[in-house]
Amino acid sequence: MPKLKTRKAAAKRFKATGTGKFMRRRAFHNHLLDHKTPKQKRHLKTKAVVDRTDEERVTLMMPYA
């Protein structure tokens, strides 16, 4: 069976944890930040775990992660 290719777009967006879950960036922290509170911006900086409903899709895109 041939080797599976990793989707490079997914590899740049997700990181696998030691337990096999995937971490992702949060949305809304790119621009238009003037009206957002410091607390909101600080929270948006942190990473989030990919939801279990999307985990299978991410796993298929990154077979060796």
Image (spheres, grey):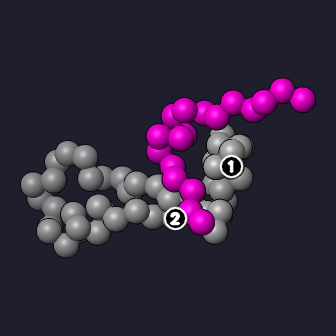
Name the residue rendered at 64%, 34% in the picture.
6
The percent coordinates of residue 50 (x first, y second) are 55, 60
Write down the region rendered in magenta: 1-18
Q: Secondary structure at mark 2?
A: strand
| Residue positioned most to the left | 34
Can residue 11 be spotted in the picture? yes
Label 2 vs label 1: CA separation? Answer: 13 Å
The answer to whether residue 9 is above or below residue 33 is above
Badge 2 amino acid: Val
The answer to whether residue 24 is above or below residue 60 is below
**52 left or right of 46?**
right
| Residue positioned most to the top | 2
> Badge 2: how crowded within 10 Å, few (<14), some, or many (20+)?
some
Residue 4 forms part of the magenta stretch: yes
Badge 1 amino acid: Thr
Q: Quadrant of residue 22?
A: bottom right
Residue 49: image tag? 2
Residue receiving disc 1: 59
The percent coordinates of residue 41 (x first, y second) are 21, 63
**51 left or right of 45?**
right
- Seen from the viewer's position, the closer of residues 1 and 37 is 1
Name the residue rendered at 78%, 30% in the picture.
3
Name the residue rendered at 57%, 56% in the picture.
16
Residue 11: image tag? none
**46 left or right of 14?**
left
Q: Quadrant of residue 35?
A: bottom left
| Residue positioned most to the right | 1
Name the residue rendered at 47%, 45% in the picture.
13
